[in-house]
Image (tube, helix red, strand yellow):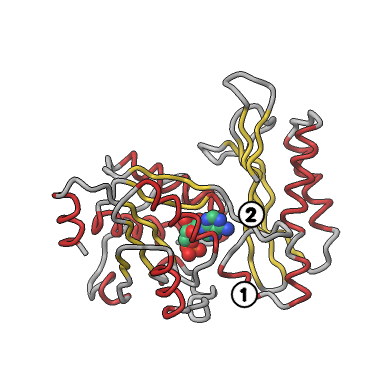
Amino acid sequence: MKEKARQARAENRIIGLVPTMGALHDGHASLIARAKRECSPVIASIFVNPKQFGPSEDFAKYPRSFETDCEKLRQAGVDALLAPEAAEVYPKGFSTYVHVEGLSEKLEGRSRPGHFRGVSTVVLKLLEIVQPHRAYFGRKDAQQARLITHMARDLNLDSEIVVCPIVREPDGLALSSRNAYLNREERKAATVLVGALQAAKQELGAGHRDALHLASTLRRKLDSEPLAAVDYAAVVDAESFEPVVRVSCACYVLLAVFIGKTRLIDNLYVEPKAPGSDELVFHL
Ligand code: AMP
């Protein structure tokens, strides 16, 4: 892969990288489509990274569909696939990790200790191997996208980190490989996440900017679903991921909710229409 990427760079081509854990869906496809519009070659990676799963998490049963994924990548016009084995990525004696301080400890990081250390380490490795001009990530994993953007800046990486909008099912559920875990009843219940975010959006649209007010709106909606157990519901600054008192700058409304045994995340991104403006633009 290094040799292939080196050759593309020597030909002055713009390399795009789309890292994934496979079990590909239309969310991944949207990243690939954006990369195809902006880059050639487009390289995708599939690697279910053991180091970003906790000991009691779903690494062993994470959905894997390699053959179907390869066909989807071919159809999407991806030029190359990087799909290494864990033993290649982490050879015997592997002991070097990247830790993005601060961001790694909050929210997702607090609920999933060690998760972001695994994410930043593997993403840095992928960026080092391919050295893409642009690497594409989904806003579905907002904290991950922020963490990677921050790491790229701190470590002077040459890759531009591009963050793409969330792709949703017709009923609003954010696409996720983990949606495959949901039974029929849970699948119905899972729309409570987007429902809660829509309720928050409505309150913000009506001029309520108080984070406590928004948090209680989220809770009320989420608590109305018997199959849902809230891990966190937070309103945070979009850069620092620190809680805000009022929504007056770019913010995320973030949710992590168990539907049965399946942990789902979703978010609403809100930003002022123009610098200093009181009017908000919503990205759901
Ligand atoms: P994953 O395979 O779940 O690790 O995801 C690979 C990339 O696809 C990450 O950058 C995700 O944020 C992104 N992604 C996953 N789901 C979606 C979605 N519904 N919409 C947009 N991007 C997504």
Q: Which residue is drawn at the image coordinates 76% and 42% (left, top)?
A: 200
- Dot 1, crowdedness within 10 Å: few (<14), some or many (≥20)? few
Q: Which residue is drawn at the image coordinates 53% and 80% (left, top)?
A: 61
Dot 1 or dot 2, earlier in sequence: 1
Return the residue nearer the eye: 233 or 74. Answer: 74
User: Where residue 48 appears, x then y in whole percent?
Assistant: 42, 71
Of badges 1 and 2, the one in the foreground is 1
Return the residue nearer the eye: 19 or 217. Answer: 19
User: Where residue 8 appears, x then y in whole percent?
Assistant: 19, 54
The answer to whether mark 2 is within 8 Å of ligand 1 is no
What is the three-letter code of the residue carrying label 1?
A: Ala
Q: Quadrant of residue 194?
A: bottom right
Image height of 205 relative to 10, above or below: above
Report whether 8 appears left or right of 23: left
Report whether 177 appears left or right of 84: right
What is the three-letter code of the residue carrying label 2?
A: Asp
- Distance Cα–Cα, label 1 vs label 2: 16 Å
User: Where residue 235 appears, x then y in whole percent?
Assistant: 66, 41
Most extreme residue toward the top, as rendered? 276
Q: Which residue is drawn at the image coordinates 81% and 45% (left, top)?
A: 217
Residue designated by label 1: 180
User: Where residue 169 appears, x then y in whole percent?
Assistant: 67, 61
Asked if residue 49 shows in the view, the reply is no
Q: Which residue is drawn at the image coordinates 76% and 46% (left, top)?
A: 198
Numbered disc 2: secondary structure: strand
Asked if residue 146 shows in the view, the reply is yes
Report whether 131 appears left or right of 207: left
Give the label on residue 266, or none. 2
